[in-house]
Image (cartoon, coloured by chain):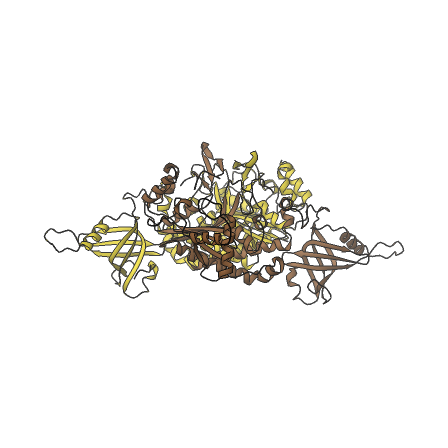
Chain colours: A yellow, B brown
Amino acid sequence: MTERILVNQLAARTDGPVSVSGWVETVRDQKKVQFVILRDETGAVQLVNPATRPDPEKTDQDAAALALTDTISNLAHGTFLTVTGDLKHDERVKLGGIEVKLTSLEVAAAALPETPIAADSSMDKRMDWRFIDLRQRRNNLIFRVSTTLEHAMRQYWIDHDYIEIHSPKLMSSPSESNAELFSLDYFEDKTAYLAQSPQHYKQMAQAAGFGKVFEIGDVYRADPSFTSRHATEFTSVDAEISWIDSHEEVATMQEELLAAAIQAVKEKHGDEIKELFDIDVVVPALPFPRIPLAEAREIVKSRGYDNPREDGDLDPESERQVSAHVAEHFGHEFVFVTDYHAGIRPFYHMVDEATGLTRSYDLLFKGVEITTGAQREHRIEVLEKQALEKGLKLEGLEHYLDFFRYGVPPHGGFGMGLARVLMLLLGEASIREVTFLFRGPTRLAP
Amino acid sequence: MTERILVNQLAARTDGPVSVSGWVETVRDQKKVQFVILRDETGAVQLVNPATRPDPEKTDQDAAALALTDTISNLAHGTFLTVTGDLKHDERVKLGGIEVKLTSLEVAAAALPETPIAADSSMDKRMDWRFIDLRQRRNNLIFRVSTTLEHAMRQYWIDHDYIEIHSPKLMSSPSESNAELFSLDYFEDKTAYLAQSPQHYKQMAQAAGFGKVFEIGDVYRADPSFTSRHATEFTSVDAEISWIDSHEEVATMQEELLAAAIQAVKEKHGDEIKELFDIDVVVPALPFPRIPLAEAREIVKSRGYDNPREDGDLDPESERQVSAHVAEHFGHEFVFVTDYHAGIRPFYHMVDEATGLTRSYDLLFKGVEITTGAQREHRIEVLEKQALEKGLKLEGLEHYLDFFRYGVPPHGGFGMGLARVLMLLLGEASIREVTFLFRGPTRLAP
């Protein structure tokens, strides 16, 4: 009996010999009996061993039994091992009603006796030892949820004939602005910049006639912010589609996408999320509510909050107020805020001439912005005019502007931070908790 | 009739009014009749317009008809437009047996009249104008094949309970060696490095108890090579699994993965690949052949090629010879070369003490190496010894080595270049052709 059995497959097996591999979560080393809680990627199981302690009065003690007892007494938390033993169903065992009575134990890699962190260590300390922190059941669940969320999004796109792209992150010119940009020495004394978003190259795919594209990949911001929502490297979820009439088609795609992805998460992990995060995953009803920015500002005001931003955009507290209003009046966790004035949007958003309003939206989820979406300006003469009006130099944008000189369809898309969605979905306080290895101004390791 | 119809949906429709959007591939502007080949992301269709030329002798000419004729006469290649017209099935039309008789034409974005490249331009020129180059049908197919390939691989992993990770590409210390590493200024005078592979962090996920992980993401090599197989930024396909006994479990997973992915490509695109690339997609039989390196060297020698490498590893021509041998004797396009001596492998490969051979393999596909896979050394004291033997300083590896001090299961995995697989699958001569936007020592734009 050497084939490894996953812990979550034990309960369905009949009593008998099994082999299980995992790591030591706890050891209860009692005089007469030893208990080990062994965890693997699927669950935890109790191992039991009747202790054989050295007794000078007994001359016939079993050397193997003595050694096994001694090994268990010295097991450190986190030691990875493979055990064989007899599976026994026993209703009295709290942990799943099963236990494994040990016959042998093989240590794969012993942990140092002092674990440097505990579950209640500070976040920064836990980040130092992230690989130990991630062994916690709820942290493991975060990344299984992330896996399901991403796969469901990709499945939606595949079902709708999107092409997946991997746009380069090394660029010869800044993507959107010179601010918050990492640069590095490239070959032949050239300078390369790390992409802040795949925005330009998603648009290039439109000029290339790809029709509909998506990308999930890392992007970089030399952003000195220390908020719970910012990172210097993060995974961006992006899509871009051709032949739209306005941002509305982008919003429709994104709400369908999110509903499908959250549905998949609820089906696969809903119960476990409830158990470990005390969160009810709600599959959002379609369509999501839409509120023009001007109306959103009135709502914030009527709720007694004075938005301090002079440019008319919503500050974080205003976003929370708008979402609170939407939750109360529409029972919805999402809201598209629309009709942003061109003055507070990038140069490449399409602007309605009559109103000066962009064809764009922000998407709020539980009070936090997770997306900006827009129809892009594809008419080169208008695009150049808008860039100049924003004080940009056309020289720095030459490669980008070329995309519009040889034909391009009307198009638009959105970018969404994966970690923000996860953070809000699971009710976590910071994207640090839902990022495999967080990167920030003072965090570059491990 | 304003709803856009995709070109590949036209044939199944009955004759009548339709609206189609795409770009101008060719214009045949004859005196009495005008033909436009319009392409969208799904195909091409012939548009036809009975020309109305200005005739001073006719006073009752239709202004709209005159304008439409004039517009078509001036259409540049690549102009994106939306047309409405009457769909008509007509067996005499070579292109799919259908055509659309125009009633109106709306230009979304006119292309400049001189297209800077043609299909037969040099590769470097085509790279300068990649977004135009990508409009070619076969280039579009490359990225649809890539989409299918990736999705099928992820589906395999999802079906086998893998966790998807996004490991950071900004690192505080070099990942494998100081060679070929891009560095950049980070905050507070720190230096960051761009990851050459997700290797270390895939291994961290093993210490974290994730069990099985995968990642498809971009990695970076400051590699001055100008070969057809190298890039400074490329998409790496990676997986890592716990509780293996040798590299053999990794190889088994990888061959199943590739067979499933190529099967999906064959089903979805096999006919079109045959038409446009003249390649028969072959779903590889399982298991792939395995040949120890020593035997591979003998094979190369017996085929009359003198491998110049003194370290005993295979040079590119030797790899082609081995694959040729395997194709002739086993009828297989893949071969695992195994049993590499520790001297030609990285310090973290597990070495069999008795033989000095690593538990690792290279995977060759049609004569080119696409993967190195291995069981990793997880015993910290052995790992440190092997690092020192390779002349590495342990200080630079401290974060990595920490992963092994607090418990870790036996584990292994592989890394595979997505573009190499695509290049070989489609019989292309260079990864430049199958990369959305290639990055090399002299190529950083667009």
Can residue B313 be seen from the camera position used here? yes
Residue positioned most to the left = A57
Report x, y in % for residue A160.
56, 58
Q: Which quadrant would the N terminus of chain B be assigned to in this image?
A: bottom right
Can residue A369 be seen from the camera position used here? no
Quarter holding residue A387: top right
Q: Would residue B213 be found to the left or right of residue A377 on screen?
A: left
Q: Which quadrant would the C terminus of chain B be assigned to in this image?
A: top right
Report x, y in % for residue B360.
41, 51
Nearest to the observer: residue A342 or residue B401: B401
How many numbered badges does the structure rendering display? 0
Nearest to the observer: residue A320 or residue A438: A438
Report x, y in % for residue B37.
71, 57
Q: Is residue B66 above or below residue A368?
A: below
Residue positioned most to the top = B189
Report x, y in % for residue A4.
33, 59
Please report the residue visible at 66 percent of the width from the left and 66 percent of the height from the top: B13
Residue positioned most to the right = B57
Q: Is residue B375 above or below residue B259?
A: above
